[in-house]
Amino acid sequence: MIKGSQSERRIFQDAIALGQLQKKCFSKRGIYKNSEAFYRSLSRVCFIPKIAGRRYTGEDLLELSLGQKEIAEEMFLSIDGQDPEAWLDELFRIGELAICPICNRIYQSYMVPECPLCRK
């Protein structure tokens, strides 16, 4: 049973009815996370956060990660109920991730003095 407000349940039910989601992929906490959709098709819905309002595809996660597959995968594997944007904001805020001002790519910056991608 999906918990949440009536409008949230309706979003999930409508998406299932349209064949956009597979019911078996719901977690016990009311979020939707589908590894098969993430790894096999960038255009399929792979994640809906706990407070349903937006459906995320692999393309969305890749766009948020500036086209970097490894960051998109880390995001997908790490998000657990929150919006992917909130996850990114948190990691930037605590210094786990940074955007290189030279190559404009995201990199894991914890205890790293320079961008490991462009070495600057």
Image (spheres, rainbow, N blue to C red):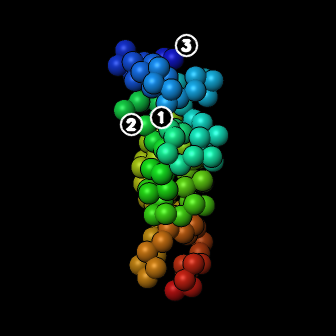
- How far apart, in angstroms, are the residues tagged by discs 1 and 2? 6 Å
To which residue does mark 1 refer? 48
Q: Dot 2, crowdedness within 10 Å: few (<14), some or many (≥20)?
A: few
Horizontal side of residue 44 vs 14, given as left or right? right
To which residue does mark 3 refer? 1
* Vertical arrangement, residue 102 with respect to residue 10, above or below: below
What residue is rendered at 61% in x and 28% in y?
25
Q: Dot 1, crowdedness within 10 Å: few (<14), some or many (≥20)?
A: many
Can you see residue 29?
Answer: no
- Mark 2 lies on a secondary structure that is loop
What residue is rendered at 48% in x and 59% in y?
65
- How far apart, in angstroms, are the residues tagged by discs 3 and 1? 16 Å
What residue is rendered at 41% in x and 30% in y?
52
* Vertical arrangement, residue 25 with respect to residue 45, above or below: above
Residue 12 occupies quadrant: top left
- How far apart, in angstroms, are the residues tagged by discs 2 and 3? 20 Å
Q: Dot 3, crowdedness within 10 Å: few (<14), some or many (≥20)?
A: few
To which residue does mark 2 refer? 54
Q: Are the two marked residues, 1 and 2, in contact with CB atoms closer than 8 angstroms? A: yes
Q: Residue furthest bottom?
A: 120
Q: Amino acid at mark 3?
A: Met
Q: Position of residue 7 (x, y in %)?
A: 35, 19
What number is the disc on residue 38? Answer: none
For the N terminus, the image quarter is top right
